[in-house]
Amino acid sequence: MDNYEIANRFSLLSKLMEIHGENSFKSKTYLITAYKIEQLTVELQTLSAEKIFSINGIGDGIGKKILELTGAGNMKVLDELLSKTPEGILEMMKIKGIGPKKISIIWKELNVENIGELLYACHENRLSLLKGFGKKTQDNVIESIEFFLRQKGNYLYAQVEKLALNLEKLFQTLFSQRTIKITGNFARQSETIEELEFVIPFNGAIISEKIEALPGFAFLENTDQYFLYKYNDGIKVKLYIAGETTLAQKFFETVGSPEFVGSFYEKFPTAIESADGDKAIFERAGLQFIPFYLREKESIIERAKEGKIPRVIQPGDIKGIIHCHSNWSDGSNTLQELANACVAKGYEYLVISDHSKSAFYAQGLSEEKIKAQHGLVDELNAKLAPFKIFKSIESDILNDGNLDYTNNVLSTFDLVIASVHSNLKMPEEKAMMRLLNAVSNPYTTILGHMTGRLLLSRKGYPVDHIKIIDACAANNVVIEINAHPRRLDMGWQWLEYALSKNVLVSIDPDSHAIEEFDNTKYGVLAAQKGMVTAKNNLSSFNLPEFEKFLKERKQKINQASVTGSST
């Protein structure tokens, strides 16, 4: 172990002590030690214990720790701290702009344990609300995290969408306006993307010559099927080689999942070869056309045989913004600004859903603030009619599965979104108890972001999707498709089952600023993969339909209450 590594260990020890709130004097001592070791002209590894202890500034305690490192290669006190530190906290230490003290505050006050969670908290304005941070720090942290994540190789669909479309245009220009097809996971609207894939109707030599003359493309590898590049030190770009006559076949083989393509070849081996287009392949097979985003599973082929693929929901089908935070909690905009933006974008209603009181880190609403907000909503509705703001809350699901207010308070809302925000590290048994209890509360209208996942950052707590969907069906609870690109929760893989149980979903942007209304689009793309239609989605209801839905639900609650009290 050389001096550089030994100094790094002492520096890490100093930072971890600060993060864990341990002795600040010792912490500073270890940082000074790291600096001194870096300045030494002789390697500590080559010195005897006696000579190490004789170095100016190295006392008994420091000397023994150096001997631990030069001997066994570890340091007991450091190992103990590392064992108490989540791996994500160590990764956060690599982010420019937040030192150990700030990491400690973020960890302890926001319960944030990794970079992805931190980025999400920044986009919810949570960092700017902490003492000693502010908007400028938050913006700098966002920039640093996004740079860091770009180096890791996996991306959200929303992060690469613009680049994918720009590269498609670039390649069309570069290759003489021939048909260039974007394919693979991006074409299937997958939640996360590892590489952008294109089918290029040219031979390998021409592809190589043209691409390698461009700035930003670093060659990685090639086969007789494709060329692989890294673009601007970030995402991989794969270019499949195809001839003019094999373009449709190559596209078909690369746009679908291996399961889908393999099954299709088994069932219709002659439909693909020499086809003059993607649609022609399905015509030859006698099938209803299967959109790219549905080419994941073998089972979709049977639905296409029966002609049962529906007209799925489109972004223009969204009639209102459900699940939106204002500056009453952790949003950026006022209620008036949010309502005006909805009107300008052609929406018919806004469901304001600020955080509940347990979310103190997000300035959650006390009972007094709820009354004041409801008064403001009434004033705005009188001015903005026929547009309407609905009174809602994103109520925390507490540790025992109860919601964050009494039923008397919950009854004052038009609808309630119930979500888990605390104690996310729990086994399935605990998660299911909390969720099922929340779903059984008569005032729970929508179950928010079911698993608590953050794509590429946090797996989310384990749940039994079937049991939760069944419980939502039994209790007339809507399941949210949280449209934030980092959530997309509930995942599309469970939508078909939910629809089979007649459970409504609700595509909600979970917006904390006006520009995040546009997140709705990514929820729609995910919903399309689950064959959700406009009639299956609550936020596609027009204003009269939405009001009717809420009224009927309230009537059922009241009837159940009367029945319960009479028995």
Image (spheres, rainbow, N blue to C red):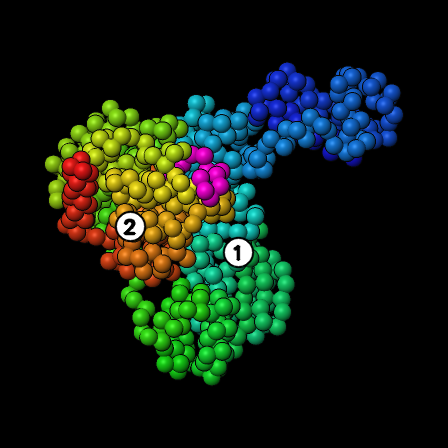
How far across and down, in percent of the image, does residue 165 sit? 43, 59
- Residue at left 35%, top 51%? 469
- Residue at left 27%, top 30%? 406
Please state the total of marks drawn on the protein image: 2
The residue labelled by disc 2 is 474
Q: Quadrant of the C terminus?
A: top left
How far across and down, in percent of the image, does residue 278 sit? 41, 75
Amino acid at dot 1: Glu
**Magenta stretch: dominant SS?**
loop
Magenta-span inclusion, residue 397: no
The residue labelled by disc 1 is 194
- Residue 19 appears left or right of 372: right
User: Farthest residue toward the front?
Assistant: 567
Instruction: Give the mark nearer the N terminus: 1 vs 2.
Output: 1
274 to 308, vertically: above or below: below
Q: Which span of residues is magenta-colored?
A: 419-430
Amino acid at dot 2: Ala
308 to 528, vertically: above or below: below
* Whether residue 51 can be seen here: yes
Please tell me which residue lies in front, 91 or 38. 91
